Image (tube, helix red, strand yellow):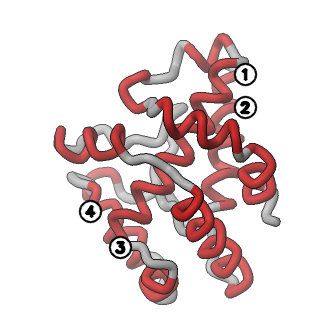
Amino acid sequence: MPALDRALSVCRVAVLALVLGAVPLVHAQVTPPGLPQADKQQIKQYTLNDDVFGRLAAATREARAAGIPPQAAPDATKVHSLNDLANQAMAADPRIPALVKKYGFTPREFMLANIALMNAIMALQARNDQALSGNLNQTWVNADNIRFVESHQAEVQALLRGQ
């Protein structure tokens, strides 16, 4: 399973890069298993764009500069919705809610943007890695987000490198 380990490592780095993106990464994709169908559908339909990515990147850079530490995975036993996931992330550091709001996100949308970005990154990784592609749940793949990440590779890579 070296390919899956590599993919998880990349995804962990990505979530560390997206300091506020406190989502569980026990699988190749970022999707909590016990979410209601409506939340799952919203994750699938959420579409990244220049505005969302720019605000997400700015919030991430500011979080790093402020010394907000990377967030641990949430307690999966307490995650029954995207709102639960967002609430755990916001409670992890008292500076996070204000930072998320400053960049025009609701906590829920911030989680959706992070999940969308991570899933698109993982889907692109899976294209080039046969072992990973077998672990990719196509349910969460949004083709528009994959195209967005492909067309913004330099910016995404810079964000993942902490720049």
Q: Amino acid at mark 2?
A: Arg
- Classify the position of the N terminus by image quarter: top right
Q: Dot 3, crowdedness within 10 Å: few (<14), some or many (≥20)? A: some
Mark 1–mark 3 Cα distance, whole angstroms, equals 37 Å
Cα separation between marks 4 and 3: 13 Å
Chain-order first, disc 1 or disc 3: 1
Residue, x 54% and y 32% (percent of image)? Answer: 28
Query: Badge 1: how crowded within 10 Å, few (<14), some, or many (20+)?
Result: few
> Which residue, given by chain and number where applicable, does mark 1 sit on?
2
User: Disc 3 marks which residue?
Assistant: 106
Q: Position of residue 131 (x, y in %)?
A: 64, 13
User: Would you name the residue on which mark 2 appears?
Assistant: 6
> Quick check: 132 left or right of 22?
right
Whole-angstrom CA distance, mark 2 to mark 4, is: 29 Å
Q: Are marks 4 and 3 in contact (CB under 8 Å)?
A: no
Q: Nearer the viewer, mark 2 or mark 3?
A: 3
- Above or below, 69 relative to 33: below
Q: Which mark is residue 28?
A: none
Q: Which residue is mark 4?
A: 84
Q: Residues within 10 Å of mark 4 (few under 14, many from 20)?
A: some
